[in-house]
Image (tube, helix red, strand yellow):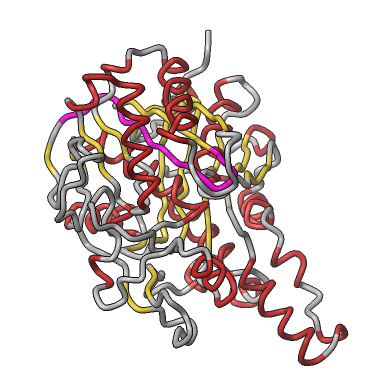
Amino acid sequence: MKRRVVITGVGAVTPIGHGKEAFWNAIKEGQCGIDLVTRFDTTDYTCKIAAEVKDFDVTQYVDRKEAKRMDRYTHYAMAASKMALEDANINVEELDGERVGVILGSGVGGIGTLEDQHSTLMAKGPGRVSPFFIPMMISNMAAGHIAIMTGAKAVNETIVSACASGTNAIGDAFRAIRNGDVDVVISGGAEAPITPLAFAGFCSMKAMSTRNDDPKCACSPFDAERDGFVMGEGAGIVILEELEHALNRGANIIAEVVGYGSTDDAYHITAPAPNGEGGARAMKLAIKDAGIEASDVDYINAHGTSTPYNDKYETAAIKTVFGDHAFKFAVSSTKSMTGHLLGAAGGIEAIVCALALKEGYIPATMNYKNADAECDLDYVINKGRNQEIQYALSNSLGFGGHNATILLKKY
């Protein structure tokens, strides 16, 4: 018999708030974290907007000296992990460290450190490059620091699958617990990509919105006039736990993870396959894994990036999987509020799904004004709704053709 897996704690560092309560309240209020970039001069950039993390002091979570030896994405991961453990009411010293794992996702890891140290190399020579450069930059280091902080000695991995990273990480963590390898996994994603070089790269691809004169409305998933995604940053961490382990310690269970699907388009490095064929297969696999019918799903937190191709093809994929039922349930993109956190998107969107199930509330797709004939589902336009739901599905799709879907159930 397969072991059951539940979410017992969540932690979030996001452009619209930090911690479960602040983040969830902002989602329900339809707040937007997108504004003009403050981190660097965007004079020569076509896109000048992003969803930056605000009012964040890493020293509330990490010793100041240690924090100086970490990239910003690790700061976010450490803070969100501490929040999640506190929310789960877990005393890590009482756990068997050999039964606790860490599986995170990050698309670009310590890219800020890479840029900073390259500038040092060019200006001052190799002797001035920091001895901490490598352990600050490499994408697995947030997971390593979390293990040191918590004493987690079981599986420790970092998944790199672009914007699907966070969801792939949670899916792999779910399987590790279900298969009996571990009892607890700290999982999710962390990202800090708002840097001059990374931003310039996405600008050159013409992937980001250039609605610089109206930042709050720039991310408009499924709207006919959507013109690109808006980059975000932060971390979303969930505590996954084997059900009996959670019950034995009297945990407050937020939701249950019941299915996972992961596929690849094998089509193009950046463009999704026509009609979202790969994403459709990922959703089908998650539904099959959960042992339910497609018609049982009540809500999808879509990848919904506000790019012309993603939104059209994800809509098509949903219709492929759900048929007539696609017009009977809710689909929304919370990226309209948070921006796109790349490898961390799946982490915060899993939190959204878990809390939606717990509280019976479906969040909105904000900034929707113009109907698109090819995007014709119920996108919960501009205002969330109170509605009891039993199953929620979260999609994440990434460059390289990566598709990941997790399926959560009300506990």
- Residue 184 is a magenta residue: no
Q: Please provide the residue range marked out in magenta.
A: 388-402
Q: Which residue lies furthest to the right in this view?
A: 127
Residue 133: quarter of image: bottom right
Examine the rendered structure and indicate whether residue 12 appears above or below residue 176: below
Q: In which quarter of the image is the C terminus?
A: top left
Q: Which of 88 and 142 is in front in this view?
A: 142
Q: Where is residue 214 in the image (x, y as percent from the top left)?
A: 24, 74
Relative image position of residue 336 (x, y in whole percent): 28, 56
Residue 387: where, in percent of width, then height?
13, 33
Please, which residue is most extreme toward the top here? 1
392 is within the stretch colored magenta: yes
- Looking at the picture, tell me which residue is in the foreground, 387 or 396: 396
Q: Is residue 94 visible?
A: no
For the question of whether residue 198 can be seen, the reply is yes
From the viewer's perspective, tell me whether residue 345 is left or right of residue 2: left
Residue at position x 22%, y 21% from top? 325
Q: Which of 20 and 63 is in front in this view?
A: 20
Apparent side of residue 119 relative to residue 346 in the rendered image (left or right):
right
Q: Where is residue 64 in the image (x, y as percent from the top left)?
A: 59, 77
> Residue sitting at 25 percent across and 24 percent down?
390
| View extreme (bottom): residue | 124
